[in-house]
Amino acid sequence: MLMFTTVQSLIFLMQIFHRHEISVATTFFLFLLFFANSADAEVRYDAHVITVSGKIDSLVYDDLSKIFANESVSTIVFKNSGGGSFFPALNIGKLISEKNVKTVVEGVCASACAIAFLGGDSREFSSEQADSALMFHPGFAQASQVPAQETKAIFFKWIESRTKHPPSPEFVAAMNKISNRRGGVYFLSPSHGIALKKGSSVFFCEGSEGNIGKCTTQSDSSAEKMHITSN
């Protein structure tokens, strides 16, 4: 099974905070947020909006399928999800892509959640929560704890199919530098506190289990410029 984990995403986000001198209060808040994200999946429907939080797995796919079959849906909000499994996330994204709906990140949408989020016909950060973030990293083979090479082509093809653009060479290089469970590509909302403080909303982080690598800012880019979000 190919897994994404909340804890490793937490490590790198915490690293960004410390490197960029973000307040202890903010760090502590998001530390709690990430561990809350390890909860089981929750899927709620209200007034044409589906809210998905917690673990991204096949149960989320089943719940979304039932809602789509019986209700009118305009928006799916991914709210505070730290990840899940690669192929269920991909299936969820493909299901969403068939429905011509908007996807929204509210809070943190990491790993498998970010894969599912790409299914939206339009994609955006929440206007309700300024400090929202998307986080991508490769699928990991559970037995070896290293990136599963066989899924990388699937991953890049999925991004291209949804954004209508091939992943940038910088994005691909950043993903290829991830040699173990620590590393990722982080897209922050332009209104995120870190983005406002540092003048950058994109961070490429590399590393391995034994060596937490550096995070570099992409000051001339954004989720929108890289077509991850549509506005």
Image (spheres, grey):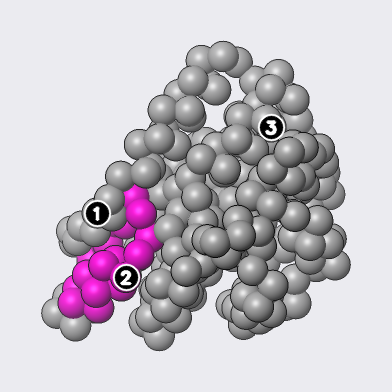
The CA distance from mark 1 to mark 2 is: 12 Å
Inspect this view and state whether residue 215 appears: no
Q: Is residue 57 left or right of residue 122?
A: left
The structure residue drawn at horizontal position 38% and vertical position 80%, both measured from the top left corner, is 95
Magenta-span inclusion, residue 116: no
- Give the residue type that dot 1 points to: Glu
Reading the chain from its start, which is encountered first: label 3 or label 2? 3
The crowd level at tag 1 (other Cα within 10 Å; few <14, some 14-19, many 20+) is some
Look at the numbered disc 1 and give the secondary structure of its residue. strand
Q: Which residue is mark 3?
A: 16
The CA distance from mark 3 to mark 2 is: 31 Å
Position of 79 with respect to 133 (left or right) is left
Q: How many marks?
A: 3
x%, y% of residue 105? 46, 52
| Residue carrying label 2 | 58
Q: Residue at x 71, y 19 (%)?
A: 21
User: Disc 1 designates what residue?
Assistant: 42
Look at the image and give the residue range highlighted in magenta: 48-68
* Tag 3 near tag 1, CB within 8 Å: no
Q: If you read the primary sequence from the N terminus, does the residue marked by circle 1 or circle 2 appear first?
A: 1
Residue at 83% in and 62% down:
173
Q: Position of residue 80 (x, y in %)?
A: 40, 45
Secondary structure beneath disc 3? helix
Q: Few, some or many C-alpha atoms within 10 Å of disc 2 (few <14, some 14-19, many ≥20)? A: some
Left or right: where does residue 168 sit relative to residue 55? right
Badge 2 amino acid: Ser
